[in-house]
Image (cartoon, helix red, strand yellow):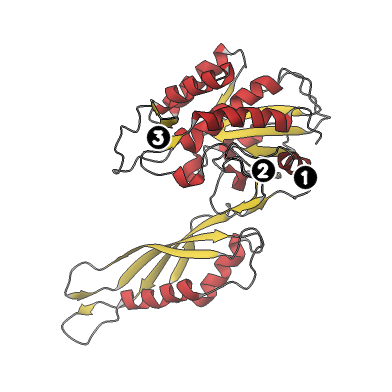
């Protein structure tokens, strides 16, 4: 194991030991800030976001952003281990946030340390963002106005170091169906739950005409439903929530307008800002990723579209998502990452970016 990998694992273990669920990352940000100070990287901070700008910044050059997030989801009750106790066992480092997104965070940091010490044709920035798991406004969206203009970003997320060149967007809809209360024993009232079921059936069966070659069709999933106060009262109100994953063929606003035109209930979108994102396949960053050769698992690098959301959705520039670990381990009980994956990621990031021409 290289010294870079050993240091990365030490930092990751320190972060795992600190609960850092979204909007509660202060202690973890303090820990990371102290670590960056010890490395003389001169971190800057806004809320719980931390970033470093490599020496020699030149406004006349393109700027590359390396980005990963500090926060985690809440641990589920299904954990058989303590989620905040890092345990290394059989080449697996267990702990909440080990895979998502600690492995990418520490790997990108080590790559930044190496790359910032070598002459590059681009400016380099490392960003550890907050509130990514909830797309919070005190996360990357808060810090972007404080950064220099970004030409392209490399977003660290668990992709098995495969290049995700596109990512689905997200829109959450809250729908309210209205009826009229009545006694369940008599043929009276207007059941709001039944009205909601008609709308849910449309959402379940409707297919938007345009499908993406990389991201597939728009996906709409009803995930929460609430109605009624007691068994013998016909409900006069039913609310349900819809998770919408958009492709690049439609903006979230276009999808919203289509839904509103077909549903009888009142539709409210929590936000339109998390649209689908992508990077052109011919971009130098993508082409450099494809030249890396097989992953640590021996698989060829293959561009693909990711169904999961990341900070990419809020970046105003082309971005590539690529990082150690596997997306299937994210948000699961007994989450883990392999130290060998972190070691390979550090080497891959350095090989990918050292001498890159943007």
The residue drawn where x is 38% and y is 72% is 177
Residue 159 percent coordinates (x, y): 57, 43
Q: Secondary structure at mark 1?
A: loop
- Quadrant hosting residue 125: top right
Label pair 1/3, CB-CB below 8 angstroms: no
Q: Left or right: where does residue 84 sit relative to residue 322?
A: left
> Badge 3: how crowded within 10 Å, few (<14), some, or many (20+)?
many
Residue 286 percent coordinates (x, y): 73, 43
Label pair 2/1, CB-CB below 8 angstroms: yes
The residue drawn where x is 79% and y is 33% is 62
Image quarter where the N terminus lies is: top right
Residue sitting nearer the eye, 330 or 191: 330
Check disc 1 and report the residue beneath it: 283
| Sooner in the amino-acid sequence: mark 2 or mark 1 | 1
Which residue is farthest right? 60
> Badge 1: how crowded within 10 Å, few (<14), some, or many (20+)?
some
Q: Left or right: where does residue 248 sit relative to residue 25?
A: right
Give the label on residue 96, or none: 3
What's the CA distance linking mark 1 and mark 3?
A: 34 Å
Residue sitting nearer the eye, 276 or 285: 285
| Sooner in the amino-acid sequence: mark 3 or mark 2 | 3
Residue 218 in view in this figure: yes
Give the label on residue 320, or none: 2
């Amino acid at each position: 194991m290289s010294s870079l990998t050993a240091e990365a694992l030490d930092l990751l273990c320190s972060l795992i030991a600190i609960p850092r669920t979204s909007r509660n990352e202060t202690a973890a940000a303090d820990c990371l800030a102290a670590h960056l100070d010890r490395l003389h990287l001169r971190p800057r901070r806004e809320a719980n976001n931390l970033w470093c700008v490599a020496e020699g910044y030149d406004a006349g050059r393109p700027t590359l952003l390396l980005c990963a997030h500090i926060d985690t989801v809440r641990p589920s009750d299904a954990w058989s281990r303590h989620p905040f106790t890092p345990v290394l066992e059989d080449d697996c480092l267990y702990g909440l946030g080990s895979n998502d997104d600690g492995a990418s965070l520490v790997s990108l940091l080590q790559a930044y340390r190496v790359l910032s010490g070598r002459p590059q044709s681009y400016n380099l920035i490392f960003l550890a963002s907050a509130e990514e798991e909830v797309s919070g406004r005190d996360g990357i969206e808060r810090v972007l106005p404080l950064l220099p203009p970004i030409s392209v970003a490399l977003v660290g997320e668990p992709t098995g170091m495969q290049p995700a060149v596109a990512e689905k967007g997200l829109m959450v809809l809250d729908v309210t169906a209205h009826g009229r209360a009545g006694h369940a024993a008599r043929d009276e009232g207007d059941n709001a739950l039944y009205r909601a079921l008609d709308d849910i059936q449309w959402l379940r069966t409707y297919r938007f005409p345009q499908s993406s070659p990389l991201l597939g069709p728009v996906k709409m999933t009803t995930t929460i439903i609430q109605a009624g106060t007691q068994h013998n009262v016909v409900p006069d109100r039913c609310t349900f929530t819809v998770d919408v994953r958009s492709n690049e063929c439609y903006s979230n606003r276009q999808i919203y307008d289509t839904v509103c035109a077909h549903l009888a209930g009142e539709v409210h979108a929590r936000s339109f800002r998390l649209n689908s994102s992508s990077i052109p396949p011919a971009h130098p960053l993508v082409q450099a990723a494809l030249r890396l050769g097989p992953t640590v698992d021996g698989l060829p690098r293959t561009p693909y579209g990711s169904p999961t959301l990341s900070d990419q959705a809020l970046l105003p520039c082309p971005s590539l998502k690529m990082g150690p670990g596997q997306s299937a381990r994210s948000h699961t009980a007994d989450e883990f990452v392999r130290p060998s994956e972190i070691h390979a990621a550090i080497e891959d990031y350095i090989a990918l970016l050292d001498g890159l021409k943007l």
